[in-house]
Amino acid sequence: MNFQLTKEQADIQKAAREFAEGEFDKEQIYKYEQESAFPFEIWKKACELGFVGTRFPEEVGGQGYGVLENALVIEEFCRKDSGVGLAFSCQLPGAELVALYGNREQKEKYVAPFLRGEKYFSIALTEPDHGCDVRTLSTVALKKGTEYLINGNKTFISYGTFADFNPVFCQTDPKAGFGGQTVIMVEKDRPGYETLHIPDKMGARMMPSAQLFFRDVKVPEENRIGEENKGFQLFMGTMVASRVEMAAQTLGMAQGAFDRALDYAKTREQFGKPLSSLEVIQFKLAEMAILVEAARGLTYKAAWCFDHGMGDHKLTSTAKVFASEAALRVTDEAMRIFGGYGYFLENDVERFYRDARAHVFLEGTTEVQKMIIANAILR
Ligand SMILES: Cc1cc2nc3c(=O)[nH]c(=O)nc-3n(C[C@H](O)[C@H](O)[C@H](O)COP(=O)(O)OP(=O)(O)OC[C@H]3O[C@@H](n4cnc5c(N)ncnc54)[C@H](O)[C@@H]3O)c2cc1C
């Protein structure tokens, strides 16, 4: 068992760190945060330098690396800035689904321009009445000749306000539950397709949320991704790696909040000495360091296992739950160490806390992950 990164992995990690240091400009980021805007300019540079395509195949313009290398990039981005890192990483699952299950034409049409920074993805599963319970969806696609006719609506869809490509989970066989769902690509200019921004979110502000409405939206059958009625398998097949990348996001956020709290504790003086000389603060820092280290171990293990053909929902969900819950505790403790200063935007830690909070819902709540883990244990 070797716990060291390879030279190539260490180089990728360093390159991602240097990119984030150089390009994540604080003033510009506050503007994005306050306007709930996606950081398009930084994203395009990240695409040009190949960070976005880290784990996409070379034939569609990616770098051809694995989940571990991608996790290293995501961790560094989220460590430097929770909002930018989150907004970047959550762009990936829709494109990953097409890269995994789309045909050659679909990969060229959808994934290649995405990796060039020209087009954007969402992934649309959640509905107003179907959050954790997606056994039967209300968004229905009826096959009419060579077209699908889609009716229904989705909610909480990240990037829905501007995404060009929207893989939409539709019920194609209403009686078959999970076994009757199909993924259909809806482009943003399809007649009958509309979106509505959902404002005032606690965190994840650079990843705007939207409701999507489908009113008799006609889509040609060549927009179907994968086989008909296999949509749920496609979703789970995408999640086994994507949830590891979610874990990497919260790992990076926890590390970033820890870094800031450590620096602050060394420099802030009260009662004539630095906070870091107080045992209670030292214990907080030690507990935070334990959580970060354990989250890193689980995240890297889940990534490595996936890359070595041992992708496993139980391990993925374990990493996601542990890292996201650890990030909540670490970001909370970081705010406490900052005292009142931690409550203000300029010290970052309150934003790290707000952004980390989204991960107990994103790509399946903590409770849903525990259901997956329990099912695997009790099988
Ligand atoms: C910032 C943000 C971005 C998102 N982006 C997207 C996106 O891009 N695409 C997309 O499709 N969705 C997206 N979502 C939706 C997200 O996946 C859902 O919020 C999540 O699946 C939970 O659904 P719900 O909110 O309807 O909660 P509900 O299903 O109503 O659940 C409410 C609570 O009950 C618990 N619960 C429900 N059922 C059970 C059960 N059987 N056992 C135990 N506990 C249970 C849940 O864990 C939760 O705590 C996003 C959500 C957020 C907050």
Image (spheres, rainbow, N blue to C red):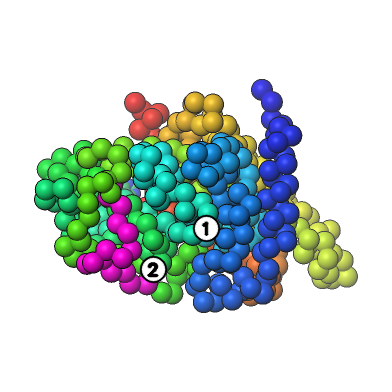
Left or right of 40? Residue 185 is left
Residue 347 seen in the current view: yes
Q: Residues within 10 Å of mark 2 (few under 14, many from 20)?
A: many
Q: Dot 1: few (<14), some (14–19), or many (≥20) neighbours within 10 Å?
A: some
Disc 2 is placed on an element classified as: loop
Relative to 261, is 112 above or below? Answer: above
Name the quadrant of the N terminus: top right
Magenta residue check for 210 = no
User: Tag 2: residue type?
Assistant: Thr
Q: Amino acid at mark 1?
A: Gly
Give the camera-side residue of 102 and 341. Answer: 102
Give, as a single range, the part of the protein colored magenta: 183-197
Magenta stretch secondary structure, dominant: strand
Res 196 → quadrant: bottom left
Residue at point 16%, 62% (across, down): 216
Which residue does the numbered mark 1 point to in the structure image?
A: 117
Q: What residue did someone put label 2 on?
A: 161
Residue shown at the point (42%, 42%) measured from the top left: 99
Residue 7 image position (x, y, % from top left)? 74, 34
Question: Disc 1 on helix, strand or loop?
Answer: loop
Q: Residue at x 73, y 47 (%)?
A: 14
Estimate the x, y position of residue 294 in percent, counting from the top left.
63, 40
Is residue 192 located in the magenta-colored stretch of the structure?
yes
Alpha carbon separation for disc pair 2 and 1: 17 Å
User: Is 30 above or below relative to 287?
Assistant: below
